[in-house]
Each structure stands twice: as C-alpha cells, then as structure tokens.
Amino acid sequence: MNVTTDKLTSNDLMQMEDKHGAHNYHPLGVVLERGEGVHVWDVEGKKYYDFLSAYSAVNQGHCHPKIVDAMVEQAKMLTLTSRAFYNNALGPYEKFVTEYFGFDKVLPMNTGAEAVETAIKLCRKWGYEVKGIPENAAQIIVCENNFHGRTTTIVSFSNDPVANKNFGPYTPGFIRIPYNDTTALEEALKNNDNVVGMLVEPIQGEAGVFVPDAGYIEKAQQLCKDAGALFMADEVQTGIARTGALLAVCGDCSCGNTCQKDPNTFVKPDILILGKALSGGAYPVSAVLADNEIMNVIKPGQHGSTFGGNPVAAKVAIAALEVIRDEELAANARRLGQLFRKEMQRIIDSTDLVVKVRGRGLLNAIIVNDTEDSDTAWNLCVALKENGLLAKPTHGNIIRFAPPLVMTEEQLMECVAIIEKTINAFEK
Ligand SMILES: *Cc1c(COP(=O)(O)O)cnc(C)c1O
C-alpha cells in the first residue's frame, strides 16, 4: 500500500489508527471525510445523518460557512501571540461573550477539561481570599456519575472506575453526593464552612442524558448561596442552545438569550463553564465566566494557557455565538426536541427493544431494554450506521441522540423513519 498515492479505504484507515494510535477510544466503524450541516460522508462516499454532533460541539452544523470564513480569514492574518502581548481580536471577543452571557469577565481556555480546572482553581482561590477559609482546607461538592473531563484532578472525583482506576493518587478536596438530591446537598453544606462551591452539570450528559427534577438546579443554587458557596455550572455539553435554551440552567425559559440580564428570571451560576459548541466544533475554544468579585482573585501569572484567547479562537467563538442567535437555534432545538421525544415515545409504545426516551431540547437518549453490560445498544448503533445515521452508546444500554441544531423538521422526520426502520428490523 502506497500511502501517498492510493486512496485509503475505511479499513486501511481503521487499521492504521489501531496500529499507530493509542487505544483510548472505541469508535464506531465509520471513517468520515467530509461534513456539511447535519450530514457527514465517509471515505467511500456514503452519506450519514450525524446524531452525535461530536458530543454537542457541532451544534451549529458541520463546517458552518460563517464560522469557517471567520476562522480562515483570521488564520491568514494572525494566529497566535500568546498572552505575553495583546492582540486585537481578544478584547472584542471578551466584550462580546460577557455581554452575550451576562457576566463581568471571561477567562479564555481551549478545552472543556481546562475550563473545568480553571473553575476549580478560581473557586478555591475565592474560598481562601474572599471567604477566608484556612489554607488547603477547601472542599468542592460534586455529584455522582459526573463527567467533567479527563485531567488527573477531574478523574479524582469521578466514580466511574473506567475513568479513574489506576490513575491515582487522587486530588483531595472533593465531596461527592447523589445527583438530583437537594437533601444530600443540604447535608453536605451543613456545618461545613470549608465548602467553597458546588460543581454540577445541569443535565448529566455522559451519564446518559439524566435530566434532574424540575427545580433541582434552582434549589441547589439557592442552597449554595445560603451557605456562602459558589454554584458552578458545567455547561460544556448542555450549553449553547443544545437543550432548547441558551443554557440548560435556563430550564424551559424560551426567551432565547436575553433574560440572563434579569437576575429574577435567570438562574445565574456564580461560575459558568463553556466549551464544545462555543466554537461550533471548528476549533478548541472554552471559557469560564464570572463576575468581578470572583474573577478578580486571579492575578497575573497565577493561571493561563499559551493558546487560550488566541485570535483565531476569538473570531471563531464570536461567529459561532452569532450563528446560535441569528439562526434561532435554541428555539429550533426546543421545537424539534419535543417532536423527537413524541416520535420516540410512539416507537417505544410498539416495541420491546426500547423502554424509555428522555432529554431536553435536542439532547436526548433512549434506553435499550437490556442489561448495562450487554452489547445490544452497540449493535443497534451499528445497524443505525448501516441505515445512514450515526449515534453512539453511552454507558452500556443508553444511546444518546444529539443531532446538529440546524436540522429541519423534514430531516428530523427522515431520521425518525431511519430509527424506526432499524428498531423494527432489529427485533426480527
Ligand atoms: C465534554 C465535556 C467536558 C470536557 O471537555 P473536553 O473538551 O473533552 O476536555 C467537560 N464537561 C462536560 C459536561 C462535558 O460534556
């Protein structure tokens, strides 16, 4: 095989990854070459609906022309200065993104995990310098079945053995409580002045799109506030229109992205963590947002990133957020999400293979009627792939369905037909 001239087949490319790449993922057997909007194509030219959207990074659709143009234009001009010098793209982006989400300040990073790390550092520093707790005593409350990324500290407070076994010793300073349980939170906050904050996903994505009870987020925020602890929302996956509102902490609020300026109608986290769709999947861009009282504890030299806040990221993020607003993707996600769950419920009512659909907006999951260690969900995803729709199981018997938010109703119904056909054929 001559790798420089021959067109490599899907099999060639999968074997190449298998041989030369670390085996830290187990991808579905499809090799993608091109993407546009809600579609992707494999190297043999077969077209698929993307029903994962790179874990909700591609909310704006693949290769959105406005985002790609912003990236290319800036890439030709200036790509990286580091923060040793100013650049003319960062300030306008910082102004834009803080106004967009209603915070005083932003700290720009690249990946979601880095943004979570940043939030943890910020929260601890605030705890020592503003709340005044004793040195090295800070504790942060996290939830069971959380997913916040892959760094050593973040896996330290995961309860998924796949994520943290043999990666110890673990970073101390975290208290893990059940998700969706305000009594447990109250208990954890009680008589413990060393709690500096709570880190939580408004909907647990990786855990299988677990939607907490109505009012949980509001109550959790209030309890943190009463206890003098910071409420930190990890919206890396749920944020940026995915759940039918600009942020998942907005719940069912349908105003788009205007009400966050009104503290009476917006559950405003003390620290907001964004990533993934902040760039529309074009570039690694993440961000931590907070008001001055919190963000100002970070002084020069105390935190940073060579690539964080680079001019390409700045331009890409502005374009990606403008697309969300201009194309009203939150409203589209809300409307199509309701339709999708209704259609899934109709299918569930006529099959034994799937038992439940849950989610909000276009972040949904179906539960396959089998044990968690069965490969039924995987095999169903393989069958969906054969029929032109790409999705991936999360945690055994759960399949997440999260298409790009630029989908039309007609396309969604075509996808429903593919899913229905696949499920019906699978049973036989
Ligand atoms: C994906 C994700 C992260 C980590 O983001 P990376 O860019 O992969 O580091 C953190 N939190 C949540 C909720 C996520 O879904």
Image (cartoon, helix red, strand yellow):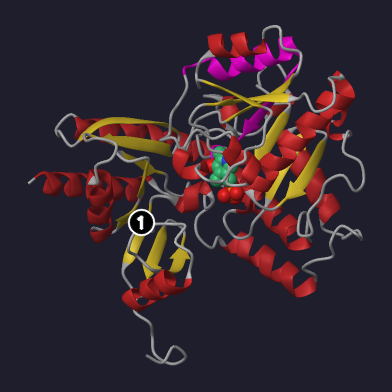
Q: Which residue is label 1 attached to?
A: 49
Q: Position of residue 122 (x, y in %)?
A: 79, 34
Residue drawn at 20 percent across, 44 percent down: 420
Residue 397, image x, y percentages: 29, 39
Where residue 79 sits, quadrant-wise, is bottom right
Q: Is residue 215 magenta?
A: yes
Look at 48% across and 69% down and name the residue there: 21
Relative to 407, residue 137 above or below:
above
Q: Quadrant of residue 273?
A: top right
In this rendering, the answer to whether 76 lies above or below 421 is below
> Which image quarter: residue 18?
bottom left
The x, y position of residue 102, in whole percent, is 75, 32
Q: Which residues are magenta?
A: 213-238
Apparent side of residue 354 relative to residue 271 in the rendered image (left or right)? left
Instruction: Indicate the amino acid at tag 1.
Output: Tyr
Q: Nearer the viewer, residue 121 or 269?
A: 121
Q: Please name the residue shown 50% across and 20% down the image.
A: 178
**Badge 1 element:** strand
Residue sitting farthest toward the left:
428
Residue 276 appears anywhere in the view: no
* Residue 173 appears left or right of 417: right
Judged from the image, the quadrant occupied by ligand 1 is top right
Indicate left or right for 224 with 99 as reference: left
Q: Quadrant of the N terminus?
A: bottom left
Q: Is residue 154 magenta?
A: no
Residue 73: x and y in percent read: 72, 70
Residue 187 in sight: yes
Of residues 256 and 202, the one nearer the viewer is 202
Residue in the foreground of this view, choosing between 342 and 124: 124
Q: Is residue 389 left or right of residue 221?
A: left
